[in-house]
Amino acid sequence: MMAEQKIPLELPKEKISRMAVGIILLLVFVLSTHFLDLNVATFVSRLENFPRIAGLFMRLNPEAFRPGIEQLILSVALGVCGLAIGGGVSFILAFLGADNLAPHPLFSVIIKGFVSLIRAIPNLVLILMIVASMGMGNTAGVLGLTLSSIGFLTRAFISTIEDQDTAIIETLQATGASKVQIIIHGFFPNVLPAFLAWISIRMESSVAESISLGVIGVGGIGMLVSRSIRQHDHPTVSTLIVIIFTAMFILEMSLNRVKKNRT
Amino acid sequence: MERSIPLSVEKKAKTYLNLGLLMAVVLFCFLYLNVNVGDIVTALPNLVGFLVDNFMPPNFTNLGVYMGAVMDTILFAIVGTYISAFLAFTFGILMSEAMMPNPWVRGLVRFFISFLRNIPVLIWASLLIFVFGIGNMVGLIALILATVGFLSRSYAESINEIAGSKLESLRASGAGWWQILFHGLIPEFIPSWMNWTLFSFEINIRASAILGTVGAGGLGILIQTNLNMRNFTEAAALIVILVAMVLLTEAAVSLLRKRLSIGGH
Amino acid sequence: MTTPLLSIKGLQKSYGGKKMVLKGMDAEIFHGEFIVVIGPSGAGKSTFIRCINRMVDPSEGELLFDGQDLAKLKGKKLRVARSKVGMIFQHYNLIGRTNVIKNVLHGRLGQIPFYKSALGLYTSEEKSMAFHLLTKLGLGEHIYKKASALSGGQMQRVGIARAMMQQPKLLLADEPIASLDPKSAQVVMDQIHAITKENNLTCIMNLHQVEVAKNYATRIIGIKDGKIVYDDVPAKLTNEMIDYIYEGKEEEMGQPATGVEPVKGEFSYGA
């Protein structure tokens, strides 16, 4: 009797909703592509030149290594300084802004609002605003990277602190510990590995952003890249790309171990 | 004999050494750049003062013109994220030990993806413009290269986690590679796939806006031009629009996450 | 004497040529046997059972099953051979976001081409077999639930149904009750025991609970340090032998679910 009965593999309701999701996803893509009005034709016509130009890039310029590495150090230094100041500021902001530790709820609201505002402005736009105010230079670069480090780290630190079990606070309060003691003994040891992990993650993007800042003229290896591009100096561009990749790769590998501690 | 009892057994000396080294590096960086922390601290109030004096009130008279750029920025991010999500899934599979037994293929793909990821997006954009000339295809491709670099690795990590044990049952029943992929991996992968993809969409909204600064269209070019021409109130309007756009996307994405109940990071 | 269903000769497994996990094992498994493999953790039980269907590739030895040496098979032939061996896992290994009946039908994957399974083109015989198995295991009402929405005991029963769906000649079970509470463990053990008996199916199962093993097995294999040290009926398994097998790891012997034993008379398929 059962063999006669037709057994569907899923309920009709589920089948319909699955198909609906599929259709919507497809539609969003098709419509977006349509309205974007991509100039595919021009692009394809330029594709003919690609093999010739790619060939020009297949050489390195040994003389570019020295200035390249010098400017790389400058880029990395900008990233490190921005991260160092940003990390310190975030550390303080996070303990004042986390829900479970804030001295007053208002602190939490203001700090979180400030942080999401900074996060919403792309780092490059931030730099352009700073440059408009104080001109190009290392200080402008560090300030820009400091602000975006604060945007990233404060939020990350706050989420780590808020994930902590509040029982620690109560236990330590019961022993008569002061707020500062609670933070030092109850929180630091628990959150430090995660904080280090966040800082390592930010380290990579800080250096990457610093290299990008060069492209718009702040200085560092990015500036060399855009200058060599303007001079149509293909081997130098290739050399600089190799330097950037190698540096970023080494950075990534050496930070991988610390990054695992993020929770 | 009295003895001090150490409260923790960790190797204090090594920790202090590392800390000292770190401090030295940071100090070197400040000296190398000739930047001092005091300047940064005083620059901040100056910056705020400058912004208040010159950027207020934002001038929205050209709002109609801006909306086109806003649409472009959003559409770039959508199309870029879509294409990247599919490319990155393929690369993620080729990079994962569980689905790609050949170590040479895995290593090669890993190297390629690492190359994409470790070159900042603006450098990609400058290079592509150099090769292909200015055009919105170039902006899109730069966005895709950077996104694929980020997503492939994240996908591969999730795929390895799933494939570790769950797919063993399908292998044991004699299922072939495509069957394991289609009936086991893909259904299990969907939550992390959505999670990572939405996350990268949030990043791409910002990236798509800045690609304009190297001439790839969108809001960025308008902001840069107006700042260079010292039309600060118009630039301010554009920045307000950009911030609103980013915050709205984030709100929309978090709403979507809740509806799909997949949770954030 | 009948020919064995599976004969294992000189089975060895080492990782990276260094660490020997299996140090040469020989055993003949006959049709209809219910074999329980016991031994402390790290002795090689899991590796042993996984070598049989090549989830783990053995380093040396022969696995004669159904007229061919499983140890030598590759690609398509290996997949076909695997489809004749069902397997039940400690952690069930269901596809959580897929519904129950589709999980059961996954048991057919080795026997049908990709396009059919991808389009859901299972035959009505296959579908009603899946439905019957689930009904019999007390999951008739849950066939459209997501597998992840089930309790541990229910998940393992889906695992049983999936393995049976393969219409296997041999059933392997790797610690099928180790993640379950005592009550579910009892139900699951009974169901595996009953379903193998009913289908006259040969079963090889890893367990760490010696008492449970004695209650169900027709034959017990004791593994210690990568070698078979006991291979006989449960009745001959002396306490001295148990002590010898678990030497140095005594604490692992009496773990939960020691009370699990077959229900006499009618087998009940608990709800």
Image: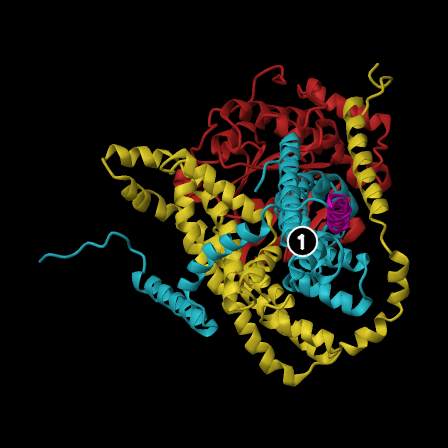
Chain colours: A yellow, B cyan, C red
Give above or below for A132 relative to B255. Answer: below
Q: Position of residue A34 (x, y in %)?
A: 86, 45
- In the rendered image, the vertical position of residue A135 relative to residue C166, given as above or below: below
Q: Position of residue A82 (x, y in %)?
A: 49, 61
For residue C116, side relative to residue C154 (left or right): right
Number of marks drawn: 1
Q: Which residue matches tag 1?
A: B207
User: Going by the image, does A98 lie left or right of C69?
Assistant: left
Residue B72 in the magenta stretch? The answer is yes
Residue appearing at x 47%, y 48% in the figure: A154
- For residue B110, say whether it is visible: no
Q: Residue at x 85, y 50 (%)?
A: A37
Report the amino acid beneath label 1.
Answer: Ala
Chain label for disc 1: B
* Quarter of the rendering containing residue B117: bottom right
Q: Is residue C137 magenta?
A: no
Quarter of the figure that contains the N terminus of chain A: top right
> Residue C40 versus residue B207: which sits nearer the camera?
B207
- Which residues are drawn in magenta? B62-86
- Relative to B70, say whether C162 is above or below: above
Residue B74, position in %: x, y? 73, 45
Q: Residue furthest left?
A: B1
Task: Name the magenta segment's main secondary structure.
Answer: helix
In the image, residue B222 sits, relative to residue A169, either above or below, namely below
Please tell me which residue is depicted at 76% across the width and 40% down the height of the picture: C83
